[in-house]
Image (spheres, helix red, strand yellow):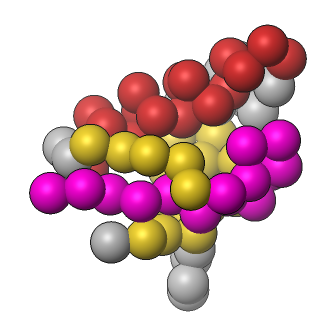
Amino acid sequence: MKIKIKVKPNSKEQSIEKKEDFYIVRLKSSPENNKANLELIKFLKKHFKKDVKIKSGFTSRKKIVELED
């Protein structure tokens, strides 16, 4: 299953919020050196309890993520 995500790095706390057709994910880490992407994968894996892969948007705040069964 693929989902659309808008990432907000450098937030005070981690959170996930469902909008109409995408999720807003707030992350504590900065976008430098791939830290935010690694935190995003870890956070989504814990939230959805499934394996997670970023399909597109590695350097963008808007990403498409695939959840695997």
Q: Is residue 12 above or below residue 50?
A: above
Q: Is residue 62 in the magenta section? A: yes
Q: Position of residue 67 (x, y in %)?
A: 32, 57
Q: Residue at x 81, y 25 (%)?
A: 31
Q: Is residue 68 left or right of residue 5?
A: left
Frontmost residue, 49 versus 25 = 49
Q: Is residue 10 visible?
A: no
What residue is rendered at 21% in x and 47% in y? 50
The residue positioned 63% from the left and 31% from the top of the image is 37
Vertical side of 54 occupied by 10: above or below:
above
Q: For the point 68% across and 17% down, which residue is it?
A: 35
Q: Which residues are magenta?
A: 56-69
Horizontally, residue 69 falls left or right of residue 46, namely left
The spot of residue 4 in percent (x, y) is 58, 69
Asked whether, in this view, residue 15 is left or right of residue 47, the answer is right
The percent coordinates of residue 7 (x first, y second) are 70, 47
